[in-house]
Image: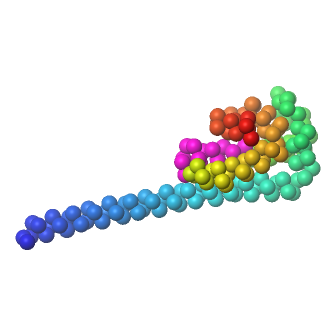
């Protein structure tokens, strides 16, 4: 073997090792991105559950929330409990949007992960808060997928 063959072999080995390292780094980046989304979803859901557990009077509004939209003048004409419930609904709908983005757009959650882990959490929130959520969804700018989830829990 001459020097040119050795040079070609070394160059080819360097190229192959570079490609292998790139593939491994890309897989690790995807895994870290996925875990970041999962932690973000989990943190949002924890905040929602904590709020519900520490504010039972506010959560009692869920069953008797009017399906009509709030007054056009905003949150000034409603009670502090209703304002707090609006905050809760905003957190919950933010959780919906993050979950839908993670699954449908960023594609970091597989269908199995979404169906087995995220959708049950979403359904639980919807069952307890459906009248209010529907009103907020009509007024808000939710994605079509989130609105579909609210329409058919």
Query: Which residues, given as a range, are shown in magenta?
Result: 92-108
Q: Is residue 60 above or below residue 150?
A: below
Q: Residue at x 85, y 32 (%)?
A: 67
Q: Is residue 27 left or right of residue 50?
A: left
Secondary structure mostly seen in the magenta stretch: helix
Residue extending furthest toward the bottom: 1
Residue extending furthest toward the left: 2
Q: Position of residue 54 (x, y in %)?
A: 87, 57
Q: Position of residue 140 (x, y in %)?
A: 72, 34
Q: Is residue 12 above or below residue 59?
A: below
Q: Is residue 152 above or below residue 45?
A: above
Q: Residue at x 7, y 70 (%)?
A: 2
**Considering the image in quadrants, where does the N terminus appear?**
bottom left
Q: Is residue 105 above or below residue 68?
A: below
Q: Residue at x 75, y 46 (%)?
A: 123
Tell whether position 106 is magenta: yes
Residue 148, visible in the rendered structure:
yes
**Considering the image in quadrants, where does the C terminus appear?**
top right
Q: Position of residue 138 (x, y in %)?
A: 75, 31
Tell whether position 20 is magenta: no
Q: Nearer the viewer, residue 55 or 23?
A: 23
Q: Position of residue 66 (x, y in %)?
A: 88, 34
Residue 87, visible in the rendered structure:
no
Q: Residue at x 28, y 63 (%)?
A: 16
């Amino acid at each position: 073997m001459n020097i040119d063959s050795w040079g070609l072999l070394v160059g080819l080995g360097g190229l192959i090792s570079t490609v292998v390292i790139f593939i491994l780094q890309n897989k690790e980046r995807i895994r870290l991105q996925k875990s970041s989304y999962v932690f973000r979803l989990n943190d949002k859901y924890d905040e929602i559950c904590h709020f519900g557990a520490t504010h039972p009077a506010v959560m009692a509004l869920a069953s008797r929330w009017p399906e009509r939209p709030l007054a056009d003048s905003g949150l000034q004409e409603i009670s502090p409990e209703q304002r707090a419930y609006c905050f809760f609904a905003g957190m919950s709908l933010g959780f919906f949007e993050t979950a839908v983005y993670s699954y449908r757009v960023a594609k970091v959650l597989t269908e199995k992960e979404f169906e087995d882990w995220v959708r049950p959490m979403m359904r639980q929130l919807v069952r307890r808060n459906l009248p209010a959520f529907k009103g907020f969804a009509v007024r808000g700018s939710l994605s079509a997928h989130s609105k579909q989830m609210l329409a058919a829990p």
